Amino acid sequence: MGNYSSKPTMPPSPPAASKELKDPWRPVKWSEKQELLKELEHLKPRLEPLRILVQGPVGAGKSCFINTVQRVLLGRNVSIALESSTTAIQGESFTLSFNPRGPIAKDDKRYNPRPSPGDRIHCLVNIVPADAISRLDDSVIDKMRTIRKKASEWSIPQVIVLTKVDNACEIVSQDLRKLYHSKKVKDKVEVSSHKLGIPLNNIYPMKNYHAEITEDTNVDVLILMALRDIVNFANDYVESMYESSDCIQS
């Protein structure tokens, strides 16, 4: 009776999974830049300078990270630190340094078999690109893990700075304050933790200054959060060396 269609009614398609979390998986106070700067300014390390070893694959953003740190601390644009540079960059109470060459040989006249606390590395910073972490060659990861293993033998604290988050996630590219709401960035943090064996709470996703010539407070806050912890980890390590019974006083 009547002209009714016999075609079955299709159920509605399920909504696409959201790429953004309702609540951040790590809280950030985006207005605390001055407080973070004061924390670093008032830090009185046991040893000066603190020495930070930076390692990472070519193009990961090592030099950009160093430049960004300098820029945030100085409050102005800075000249470029080249990836091949072996010169230490001095801060008020710490040093960011890296050397792309291999380990020094024991028969080298400069080799120091009994380094003082001031001669040692106090924190290892692994620079990893968020937009390429899954595609990094195994040989690169193996080299980084070898250095990390040696650092672990000396109980040197280690962190990952996960750069280029804006390239890895469109949401973050549009609004950096969405960083810790991004499922994609959270996944990248977990992948980098798995590949290098470093705990999640020692991984700091961020954006470096690159082409920008003006200040971005959101970039600054992320850098300062990471830098505060790196400097404190390094200082804690120095304190532990001085407290150790086999420590050689400088």
Image: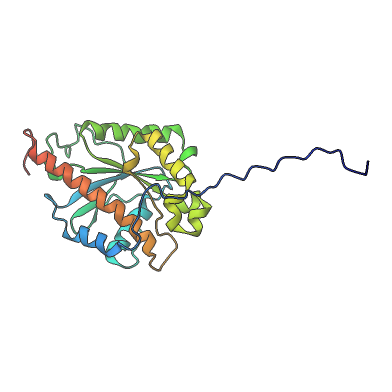
Residue 155, placed above or below residue 16: above
Quadrant occupied by the C terminus: top left
Judge by depth and name the residue closer to the eye, 106 or 68: 68
- Position of residue 243 in the picture relative to residue 71 (left or right): left
- Where is residue 246, by image quadrant? top left
- Where is residue 124, by image quadrant? top left
Judge by depth and name the residue closer to the eye, 211 or 42: 42
- Position of residue 158 in the picture relative to residue 212 (left or right): left
Residue 81, placed above or below residue 2: below
In the rendered image, residue 173, in percent from the top left (x then y), is placed at 49, 56
Judge by depth and name the residue closer to the eye, 233 or 49: 233
The reply to whether residue 81 is in sight is no
- Position of residue 184 in the picture relative to residue 2 (left or right): left
In the rendered image, residue 69, in percent from the top left (x then y), is placed at 31, 57
Q: Residue at x 24, y 47 (%)?
A: 52
Q: Residue at x 62, y 45 (%)?
A: 15
The reply to whether residue 216 is in sight is yes
